Image: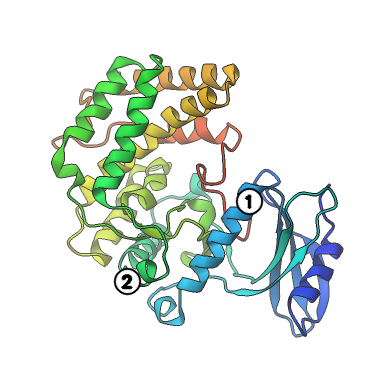
Amino acid sequence: MARSHLTLAALATSAVAGLDVAAAQPFTSNRHGDFDTALLTARDGSHYLVRVPNSDAAEAAQTAELSALTALSSGARTRLPFALTSFVGQTMLRSRDGRAARRATVYEFVYGRRVRLERLFPGVLPESIGGAIAAIHTLPTSFVIDAGLPVVTAIDSLRSVVGVMDRAAATSLVPAPLLSRWESATDDTALWQYQPSVIHGAMNADALLQSEDRVVGVLGWSDLRVGDPARDLSWILSAPSPDTVDQVLDAYAEARPGSDVNELRRRAMLYAELELAKWLLFGFDTKDSGVVDDAVAMLDVLVQSVQGHTAGALAHETGPILDVDEVERMLDQRPQVALDQRSRNSLSE
């Protein structure tokens, strides 16, 4: 049963010495019940969020996020053109049924409203998004490495992609044109000769907060790491207007000179397509025939989309051809596979 906002407020006062809560209200989330969350207003007018995870996966994500927020020192934060939350305090909850204890964690509230991808059209906001993502990618990798956060090399990324492809191929349920398309991308050595950077790791529209036409906050840092910058750009390919995509990528390139946007786009496209393969594998791993049938149907839609274009490969010589909006739409209609697979870990949902 979900904890009430009053219970969460009481936990927050236990977690943070001297916190004088004047008001509390439920804070709804699209994270499928992974957290109980309340928005608190302190007597001095400041705002906080208090969260309690409801699963082991949510607990692990919260722990990872705390590590990332600690690593993001004041020096790193001054390089970013937006706000991000800070950890304020926590308290342990005793479990009534013998399960592992959970932590109620209090964070500073980050102001702004969610970016809505379906409403993202050409203008100032896409340029601000491109600049915000580039700012993350230009942070020095040393602070991530020193904090012991994950470091994923280009070879690691390639091996991970090949691993997903091989496992999906072993099911004999992936259409041959898709396997050929993915193999052409993994065989293209130029595509994997990139320099890893600091990445958010779970970037999507839900992680971005805006005020007017500017990005003012970025949330959900549990997947902070050194890795492929294309992963942070994959979601934008499903914007409703191609001009919006171009604006984001142009602003990104301007803020991060020397980056090869075309190759970033190709890898981002590949990652988006492989989400369907991961959904298929999830069905196999959990022995859920309904999920397997669902994934097969989505892969059939994808192969029809691929075959409907004149340029059918993700090779170095070609541009993106997949309708990523269709892929994202299909995936968003499915339940969350796991916190570390579908990136929905932001603090202010």
Disc 2 target residue: 142
Dot 1 amino acid type:
Ala
Question: In front: 284, or 252?
Answer: 284
Other residues around mark 1 within 10 Å, as few (<14) / some (14–19) / many (≥20):
many
Q: Which color mode does the image show?
A: rainbow
Question: Can residue 252 be spotted in the picture?
Answer: yes
Please provide percent x and percent y for residue 154. Answer: 25, 49
Please provide percent x and percent y for residue 91. Answer: 74, 69
Q: Which image quarter: residue 148?
A: bottom left
Please provide percent x and percent y for residue 59. Answer: 64, 54
Asked if disc 2 and disc 1 are in contact, CB closer than 8 Å, the reply is: no
Disc 1 target residue: 58
In percent of the image, x 32 and y 54: which residue is there? 229
Question: Can residue 323 be spotted in the picture?
Answer: no
Please provide percent x and percent y for residue 323. Answer: 37, 32
Kindly state the secondary structure of the residue where label 2 is placed: helix
239 on left or right of 218:
left
Dot 2 amino acid type:
Ser
Kindly state the secondary structure of the residue where label 1 is placed: helix
Please tell me whether residue 112 is drawn above or below residue 202 in the rendered image.
Answer: below
